[in-house]
Amino acid sequence: DVCSSDLNAMPYYIYKIIAGPTELLKTLEKIERYDSFKEAREHARRLRAGMTDNDNYSIKVMFADSELEAEEKLMEKREQPILREWEK
């Protein structure tokens, strides 16, 4: 028995993000789509575990309504977090 709220749940997308010459120029490669965060997280962890020091990409899990929204979120320029005095 599936709850109606489960039918409308947003999916999780796993992306490989390949660094470009600038922060705004990066390549996104969709790897997989999951309905469950647990499955997406486990797959992302396996992918990260297989990475070497020579790999010039990162793996991200993105929660979004659509593939387009996930890619837009991943391409946004994010402000650097502010370091608190005790974090320096």
Image: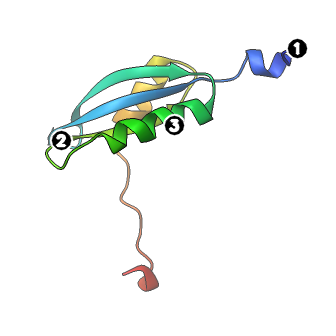
Whether residue 67 appears in this view of the structure is: yes
Q: Nearer the viewer, residue 31 or 78?
A: 31
Q: Residue at x 77, y 21 (%)?
A: 6
The mark found on residue 56 in the picture is: 2
Local SS, label 3: helix
Q: Which residue is mark 1?
A: 1
CA distance for labels 2 and 3: 21 Å
- Which of pointers 2 and 1 indicates the residue nearer the eye? 1
Q: Residue at x 43, y 29 (%)?
A: 14
In this rendering, position of residue 26 left or right of residue 1 = left
- Which of pointers 2 and 3 indicates the residue nearer the eye? 3
Q: Which residue is mark 3?
A: 42
Dot 2 surroundings within 10 Å: few (below 14), some, or many (20 or more)?
A: few
Q: Earlier in the sequence, mark 2 or mark 3?
A: 3
Where's residue 36, x and y in %?
63, 28
Q: How many marks?
A: 3
Where's residue 4, x and y in %?
84, 16
In this rendering, position of residue 20 left or right of residue 43 = left
Local SS, label 1: loop
